[in-house]
Image (cartoon, grey):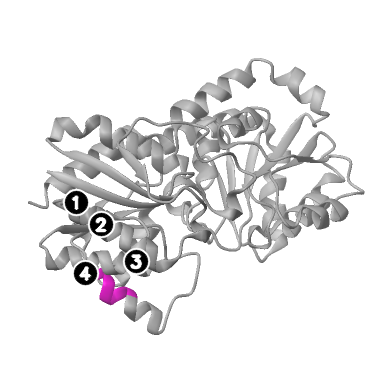
Amino acid sequence: MRVLIVHNQLWAHYKSKLFSELHRLAPQYDVQIHVVQIALSEKSRANMGEAEAFRYDYDYEVLFNTSLDQVALWPRTKALFKKIRSYRPDVLNLTGWYDPAQWALLFYAKLMGIKVVISNESNVRDHVRMGAKERFKQFLLGRADAFFCFGKSSAAYLEKLGAKPSQILTQKAAVVDNEVILEHYQKAIGERDSHKKAKNWARYNFIFVGRLIPPKNLPLLLDAFAEISAEAFDWGLVLLGEGEQKGELQRLAHNNTTIRFEAGVPWYEVAEYLALADVLVLPSESEPWGLVVNEAMICGLPVLVSEPSGCVDDLVKTGQNGFTFNPHQKQDLVNKMHYFVQNANNLTRMGEASRAIVAPFAPEKVAHEMLRGMKGLF
């Protein structure tokens, strides 16, 4: 059985790790996997590491040696059709079904009797969805044979659009590279205290990791931390990343000496900062999943995650490994942060719970689910 996976950009390291596991395990299922990466990266990822800085072992090709933003629709469509005709897959996995070029590929596959599996990251939490756009999605989804989903909320969204539960081959496609994360975590954890001292971090630290952009809702986080920092003398807040809001956020935080801004680093170095922190906070107003939550939990951190984030149904267990909060209610976040300030003795226990909860999202386990599911289509 031949499987062709169409993916937008090589930069997405977490997908590359999953593709590598699929490639490694495929012979057990008598399957061949080939991945078409449309481009190298996106302009918005410019400060997050080079697309090919970290290599994975799987069979892939890059159609356009540039950023996705610079690849026009017609050349993209022609290149994809050329590939599907030459590779002649039994299964086509589309990972960007909002792309008109991939819509065309979907209809061609159905015409040729090729099974179509759509990967879905959208969920019922991050947006209110209605109208003609949703009806068009229903039409597209009706053409698919099966789906890979990012968690329970993603599966619920597909079912709302008419997909059958039996068509969902996995709900755990939101994976990261556990091995690389743990390697870098171990690199830093042994000298945790000296690293924190060198960076002038507080004894305990909340940490945000990601782009410093408006949808991440970071003014709310700064506001909430300012409210608790007057009594939380041994707690700090770290913001790791770059983005258009950095200057504004630094101005908002300039009077608080326990807030640290750390320059953005390549994804594989993020765990070295998570090893120095104590609680991850993700305050986004909208978040299809929030893979940094996986990364933090692998590193044994409790988490505070906004309710619209797609990962909360799967990864955040209230009181066990963290809490959710309303991203439009500062006091809700203040109360949850205050819990950790008053209960620092629970950090280790809650961090261990995080490790156990995220364990089923290990890439090898998910790759097995995906391969079994695709074989079951025949």
In the displayed orientation, state which residue is furthest to the top.
190
Residue situated furthest right in the rendering: 255
Disc nearer the start of the sequence (3/2): 2
x and y percentages locating residue 266 in the rendered image: 60, 36
Badge 4 or badge 2: first in the primary sequence: 2
Q: Label 1: few (<14), some or many (≥20) within 10 Å?
A: few
Amino acid under disc 4: Phe
| Mark sitting on residue 190 | none
Contact check, label 3 and label 2, Cβ < 8 Å: no
Q: Which of marks 3 and 4 is nearer the N terminus?
A: 3
Write down the residue under mark 3: 101
Q: Residue 82 carries which label?
A: 2
Q: How crowded is mark 4: few (under 14 residues within 10 Å), some or many (20 or more)?
A: some
User: Which region shows up in magenta?
Assistant: 137-143
The answer to whether one can see residue 98 in this image is no
Callout 2: few (<14), some (14-19), or many (20+) C-alpha neighbours within 10 Å?
A: few
Label located before the other in sequence (1 or 4): 1
Question: What is the secondary structure assignment of the residue under circle 2?
Answer: helix
Q: What residue type is labelled 1?
A: Ser
Which residue type carries mark 2? Lys
Numbered label attached to residue 86: 1
**What's the distance in space between the residues labelled 3 and 1, CA to CA?**
17 Å
The reply to whether the C-beta atoms of the residues labelled 1 and 2 are less than 8 Å apart is yes
Q: Provide the residue designation for mark 4.
A: 107
